[in-house]
Amino acid sequence: MSTRRDTRTLIRTAAAALVLERTPAELTVKQVAEAAGVFPNQVTHHFGSKDQLYVAAAFSRFLRDTSRLPRAVRSARTTDAFAAAITRTALTMPSLDSVVSSLALARNNPALQDVVSGYLRLLLSRSERFLEAETTTRGWGTAHGVRSSAKTFWTSIFGSALAHGAGFAGASDDIEIAAGLALTTS
């Protein structure tokens, strides 16, 4: 017999795989329930709404995908190489589009705004710690502070993905945003 937490995790894990292939409008509670091996009412019981589940699944996947960033910059020896590597990696994370869709879902939905804000705070907190450790270890600095640099970076990444999804010419990684990180050598 699975516990409440196990069921919630099972549902979120199944949904996290589905959000890579589906927009919020395309994803159904029935699809998630079938993928998780649970009843549809269990999905809404644990997450409240399909949109809340989409946000939770998208950010769960996205936060997991950010574990690629340290590996991507490991061999970077200059601030420019670091910024280019981290930008390229972030822009090609499979879950980026689903997170941008989650941001759009929350735009006029106060209940979702609270959920998204929590995930964004977690993302920024992790990013600040990562950037602080990297700049300290490498003897670098940031032009506007670690907190501001992390916020600017993710805002640029999300904006780039949104512009690309809206038909902006070129691939999302063609959009020059690496300079937004504004790293400096000490």
Image (spheres, rainbow, N blue to C red):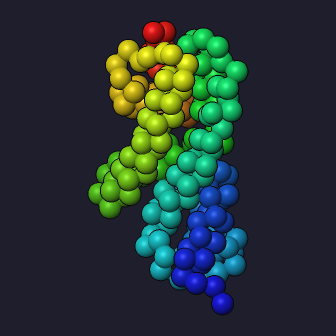
Image x and y of residue 74, in percent: 67, 26
Image x and y of residue 185, in percent: 49, 9
Image x and y of residue 155, in percent: 42, 31
Tell me the residue at 58%/66% (across/down): 12
User: In terms of depth relative to the viewer, which is nearer, 106 or 84?
Assistant: 84
Tell me the residue at 44%/35% (across/down): 128
Res 92 visible: no
Most extreme residue toward the left, as rendered? 110
Give above or below for 74 relative to 41.
above
Quadrant of image for the N terminus: bottom right
Res 107 visible: yes
Tell me the residue at 60%/26% (across/down): 86
Image x and y of residue 170, in percent: 62, 20
User: In terms of depth relative to the viewer, which is nearer, 116 or 69?
Assistant: 69
Q: Is residue 14 left or right of residue 147?
A: right
Count of labels shown? 0
Q: Quadrant of residue 182?
A: top left
Quadrant of image for the C terminus: top left
Tell me the residue at 66%/38% (across/down): 68
